[in-house]
Image (cartoon, helix red, strand yellow):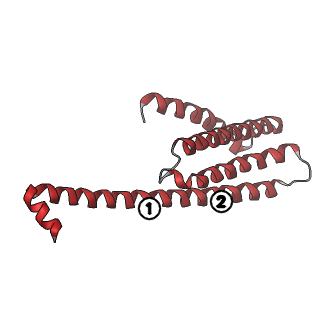
């Protein structure tokens, strides 16, 4: 990661980390806490939408490739993450829904998203492993044939 990217990532994290001590101590008024929760859930929703758009673009670009073959797992995982963010929005606007219900639904959706991502990365790992094995085998065959003279190759192909 280059320095600019590290700075851009760490600055918002530092901003969100400092109020966390006040939030953990319970010294924040309820109105401020509600606004912070609303802001964080909005940021989560926007990030989930951006992730969904980027995953769809990757699927379009890499159509037909071995890695993109299972891109639907990633898209479904991002949908689960976006639904998790939406579940938190339901808590802000709907009455009759308890915090425990929203947290359970949100955590379940995050677990499903992680399982889908694990499936995707497992399939990518297997595809890359098979690709590397086939490339290594063909490279070894090419190097063996390259070591022989032209007359030797013809003799060995005749059997």
Residue at 61% x, 53% y is 72
Q: Secondary structure at mark 2?
A: helix
Q: Quadrant of the N terminus?
A: top left
Question: Which dot, 2 or 1, sits closer to the camera?
Answer: 1
Q: Earlier in the sequence, mark 2 or mark 1?
A: 2
Left or right of residue 96: residue 83: left
Residue 27's label in the rendered image is none
Front residue of 147 and 72: 147
Residue at 59 percent of width and 51 percent of height: 74
Report whether 6 appears left or right of 142: right
As displayed, is residue 85 above or below residue 139? above
Quadrant of res 50: top right
Picture quadrant where residue 15 is located: top right
Q: Picture quarter containing residue 30?
A: top right
Seen in the picture, residue 71 relative to 38 is either above or below; the reply is below
Please provide percent x and percent y for residue 146.
14, 54
**In the image shown, does 32 or 150 lie closer to the viewer?**
150
Judged from this view, the residue extending furthest toward the right is 96
> Count the marks: how many?
2
Q: Nearer the viewer, residue 25 or 60?
A: 60
Give the position of the C terminus as an image quadrant: bottom left
Q: Position of residue 142 (x, y in %)?
A: 20, 56
Farthest residue toward the top? 4
The residue carrying pointer 1 sits among few (fewer than 14), some (14 to 19) or many (20 or more) residues within 10 Å by Cα, namely: some
Label 2 belongs to which residue?
A: 112
Q: Secondary structure at mark 1?
A: helix
* Marker disc for residue 126: 1
């Amino acid at each position: 990661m280059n320095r600019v990217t590290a700075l851009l990532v760490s600055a918002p994290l530092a901003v969100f980390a400092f109020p966390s001590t006040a939030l953990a101590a319970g010294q924040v008024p309820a109105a401020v806490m509600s606004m912070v929760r609303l802001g964080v859930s909005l940021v989560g929703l926007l990030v989930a939408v951006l992730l969904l758009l980027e995953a769809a673009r990757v699927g379009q670009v890499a159509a037909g490739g071995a890695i993109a073959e299972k891109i639907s797992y990633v898209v479904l995982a991002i949908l689960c993450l976006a639904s998790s963010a939406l579940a938190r929005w339901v808590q802000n606007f709907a009455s009759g829904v308890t915090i425990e219900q929203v947290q359970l639904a949100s955590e379940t959706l995050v677990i499903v998203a992680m399982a889908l991502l694990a499936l995707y990365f497992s399939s990518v790992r297997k595809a890359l492993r098979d690709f590397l094995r086939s490339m290594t085998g063909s490279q070894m065959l090419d190097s063996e044939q390259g070591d022989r003279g032209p007359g030797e190759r013809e003799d060995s192909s005749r059997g």
